[in-house]
Amino acid sequence: MCTESCSDVFYSKNIAWILLGDDVFVFDEITDKVYLLKDISKEFWLLIQEKKKLMDIIHQIAESYNVDFIVIKNDITKLARKFVENNLIVWSDAV
């Protein structure tokens, strides 16, 4: 069975977002909550547009920030789970 790391990542259909200056603002249209994303969480969010696999996104961030892959993998996986819990992103197993 595929784990989260080989999953495709997508934005939820119930959100709207904008890059404004150095920050990303994400609006949940169902709950009316607004999320402010900065730094690595912003980079993760923006990379969802370019790379659909969670592992590809993690590799890109590790390279960009020149950090240990295992450390950033754990951090980004936790962040992705939080985004899923808040219905900001969804993922599905690759076939």
Image (cartoon, grey):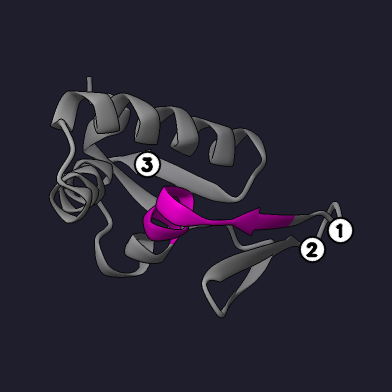
In the displayed structure image, the side of residue 55 where residue 34 appears, left or right: right
| 70 in relation to 14, above or below | above
Of residue 79 and residue 15, the one placed in the foreground of this image is 79
- Cα separation, mark 2 vs mark 3, equals 22 Å
Q: Amino acid at mark 2?
A: Glu
- Cα separation, mark 1 vs mark 2, equals 5 Å
Of residue 71 and residue 14, the one placed in the foreground of this image is 71
User: Are the residues at dot 1 and dot 2 in contact (C-beta closer than 8 Å)?
Assistant: yes
| 85 in relation to 17, above or below | above
Position in image of residue 20 (x %, y %): 60, 79
- Cα separation, mark 1 vs mark 3, equals 25 Å
Q: Residue at x 82, y 54 (%)?
A: 33
Q: Which residue is mark 3?
A: 92
Mark on residue 32? 1
Q: Which residue is mark 2?
A: 29
Q: Residue at x 62, y 71 (%)?
A: 17
Position in image of residue 57 (x %, y %): 25, 50
Q: Amino acid at mark 3?
A: Ser
Disc 1 vs disc 3: which is toward the camera?
Answer: 1
In the displayed structure image, the side of residue 4 where residue 86 appears, left or right: right
Q: Where the C terminus falls, by quadrant? A: top left
Residue 91 falls inside the magenta stretch: no
Mark 1: few/some/many CA within 10 Å (<14, 14-19, 20+) = few
Of residue 75 and residue 84, the one placed in the foreground of this image is 75
User: Are the residues at dot 1 and dot 3 in contact (C-beta closer than 8 Å)?
Assistant: no
Q: Amino acid at mark 1?
A: Asp
